[in-house]
Image (cartoon, rainbow, N blue to C red):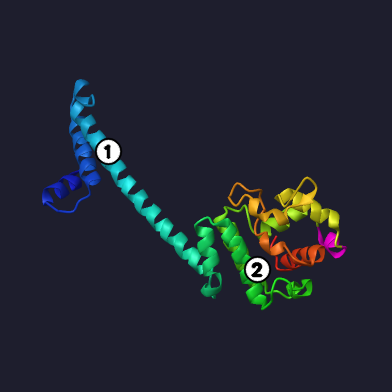
Amino acid sequence: MAIINRRGRSGRSGCPRWRSGFETFLQYSDKESRGDSFSDKIVSVSLLRAFFTFMSDVNAQLAEILDRLQSLTERVERLEARQMLVPDIERYGTLQQLLEKGDIRGADEETTRVILETASRLRDTMTPEDFRQFPCNVLRVIDRLWTRYSDGRFGFSVQVQIYGSVGGNINTLRSQDAETIRKFGDAVGWRADDKWRMDDYESWDFSLSAPEGSFPANWWKSPYGLKMATFCFTRLMECDLQ
């Protein structure tokens, strides 16, 4: 206790408010504990005031620390988002920006553009065989962006998981089982009233309230139909997006 008193007399500046309040609290505690009678040992009003002052200062300090931690967390998240685009920020930058601002439809269409540009193909000329050779690293980056900005609701990996949940596996892909693909379409909202909704794209729900696994969707509309769908799922599984 003497050490604390000596520091208090030293006149050092810059001492945090909570420490000053705590020292005052300890000084009052020490003073009160020296009394010989029972009444001298009862906590005084001054002691309680010192204690509450100390706690108030501590709470203020904690609030300031939490604010700084929140700011640092946000900065780290922004840096992580940028790192997701390495090594080709030009390829994925627009997709990230669209997803970040919640433009689901724009991001869906941009996903198709990125895939076709990477493959150097047009939608009508990209074959299922072309997709079987598609770079896994591109699919992984696209998937990470979608899952990150949708809180895990959208993305290729989510779609593969849903395909598995309706009975899909490597055998149904090899046999190009149409029934499993239809069940998948029902699960993600691509079908309604036993019909595919790809031609009704304009009326879709482009929000985070859309069925889980709904997006990306635009890319899946291919003139190769079922064969392209099964080849897409096969490639996604080969790239460990599940």
Return the x and y of residue 3 as percentages of the image width and height.
19, 48
Quadrant position of the C terminus in the picture:
bottom right
The magenta span reads 169-175
Return the x and y of residue 111 as percentages of the image width and height.
62, 66
User: Does the magenta segment cover residue 92?
Assistant: no
* Placement of 68 over or under 2, stated as above or below: below
Return the x and y of residue 225 as percentages of the image width and height.
79, 63
Give the structural element (helix, strand or loop) at label 2: helix
Residue that label 2 marks: 139
Residue, x 76% and y 49% (percent of image)? 186
Which of disc 2 and disc 1 is earlier in sequence?
A: 1
User: Does the magenta segment cover residue 173?
Assistant: yes
Return the x and y of residue 164 as percentages of the image width and height.
77, 54
Give the residue type at disc 1: Ser
Judge depth for marks 1 and 2 and give the one in front: 2
> How many numbered tags mark residues here?
2
Residue, x 88% and y 63% (percent of image)? 175
Is 217 situated left or right of 73 in this image? right
Residue, x 16% and y 45% (percent of image)? 5
Nearer to me, 230 or 218: 218
Is 42 situated left or right of 8 in this image? right
Quadrant position of the N terminus in the picture:
top left
Give the structural element (helix, strand or loop) at label 1: helix
Examine the rendering and report whether any part of residue 101 can be seen.
yes
Residue that label 1 marks: 56
The residue at the far bottom in this view is 120
Instruction: Give residue 49's quadrant in the image.
Output: top left
Mark 2: few, some, or many residues within 10 Å (few <14, many ≥20)? many
